[in-house]
Image: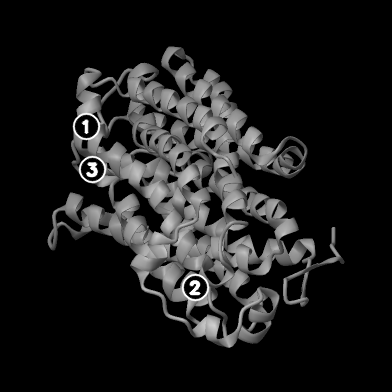
Amino acid sequence: MSFTASTTSSSGVQKPLLNFWKIWNMSFGFLGVQIGYSLQNANTSRILSAIGANPEHLSYFWLAAPIAGLIVQPIVGLSSDKTWTRLGRRIPFILGGCIVSALAMFFMPNSEHFATLFAPVFFGATMLLLMDTSFNVTMQPFRALVSDMVPDQQRNIGYSIQSFLINAGAVIGSILPFALTWWGVANEPAPGAKVAPTVIWSFYFGGGALLLSVLWTSFRTKEYPPKEYAAYNNLSEDDQKEKIPFLTLLARTPKTMYELAVTQFFSWFALFLMWVYTTNGIAQTIWNTTDPQSKEFNEAGNWTGVIFAAYSVFAALFSLAITPLANKFGRKNVYMLSLLCGGLGLISMLVIKDKNLLFIPMIGVGIAWAAILALPYAILSSALPAKQTGVYMGIFNATITIPQIAAGLLGGVLLNAFGGHSISMIALAGVSMVIAGICAKLVIKS
């Protein structure tokens, strides 16, 4: 698949359309990032519970990710907008964050072995914070890289390919502990240990995959040099050197970002609750246990990875359909319907008592997830000034992190209100996702 036409900036300089493999290569590193991120999503509660965290406090530990993103991504975006090196402007940040993320992945599942230095829960939480911070350093420039390199008429396919790779990585990361159990790796902690070997070896594999895939992007993608980038985006040399205070940039935030923020709040509030409470929820309702070191709880943990992999499979498949659907029916309408599918799927988990039936709601969750990963960025990128794409993509990340912080702070309170029934938190997530779908139709005007 290739593209041979071109797009023209107002300066008359043509910005070439890219062939499929160039777009693929610039996002390929996201495959490894998502393997690591999905391992974290499916196993963080499991690891922290095993090393002594109270279930009512789990959502507080999960605050590490959104807080890190809220602080780090705008800084990385602003910095990468002004960075020009032999490797490019975005790739140095992608590569640096990847190395730190991989190291944190090697240490986190071994938190119990550092008990002589720190309490295991404290060490695990520290590694989680380090992992999340470096994941954010790596992830943010990937969004800006596509916006930098891909012309407007290829934005749908650019972010759809990124969504496909994200979900392919999520499938691998989510299913790893289950697959290792099937291959004979022990899924229960050894005598005197706390974390199952399946989890430990999964994190080792994830860290290695992260490094290799990001290295592929780093060496197979050539970013436009300053003069060429300026010509394609109708920027002068003075434009590129202009220093605008962050608060001024914030005041000039495009209206489209505010419109998207409302939908983003409810969709990411829902996702955070799903990631935090699924293992505990299905352990209680299907395996009838709350003991985090029991065989049954670890089976529930593995199954959480399996169904998370399933929604990623459905998301990867749906991501292939997003471009033609969005071109035919409009980005906003596809976004709305996708979120409604996800919300109804999550709500249905409240009444499911058979683990195999959990695949059905994952169809809706996968459709919603694919849309969340692609459509807001396709809508937003067309509204951003070329010389500040990175910083505005970083600011936009606040629409992801703030709802997660809100969910994290409210999680324990809401869980107590539901009598400790974690599955009720999943149903609440579904309601929030439905509200997001309604907002996508009513609030987004662009």
In the depicted view, which residue is nearer to us: 257 or 102? 257
Query: Of the residues shown, which amino acid type is indicated by label 2?
Result: Leu
Which quadrant of the figure contains the N terminus? bottom right
Question: Mark 3: which secondary structure?
Answer: helix
Q: How would you rate the neighbour count of disc 3 (Cα within 10 Å): few for under 14, some for 14-19, many for 20 or more? A: some
Q: Which mark is residue 399?
A: none
Q: Return the x and y of residue 385 as percentages of the image width and height.
A: 56, 66
Name which of mark 2 and mark 3 comes first in the sequence: 3
Q: How many marks?
A: 3
Q: CA distance from mark 2 to mark 3?
A: 29 Å
Q: Is residue 147 visible?
A: yes
For residue 412, the mark is: 1
Task: Locate residue 260 relative to residue 59 in the image: left or right.
Answer: right
Q: Secondary structure at mark 2?
A: helix
Residue type, mark 3 in image: Tyr
Considering only order in the chain, which callout, 1 or 3, is on the residue closer to the N terminus? 3
Q: Is residue 357 found left or right of 69 in the rendered image?
A: right
Looking at the picture, does residue 40 appear above or below residue 243?
Answer: above
Q: Quadrant of residue 196?
A: top left
Circles 1 and 2: CB atoms closer than 8 Å: no
What number is the disc on residue 95? 2
Q: Give the secondary structure at mark 1.
A: helix
Residue beneath label 3, please?
60
Image x and y of residue 317, in percent: 69, 39
Q: Are marks 2 and 3 in contact (CB under 8 Å)?
A: no
Circle 1 crowding by C-alpha within 10 Å: few under 14, some 14–19, many from 20: some
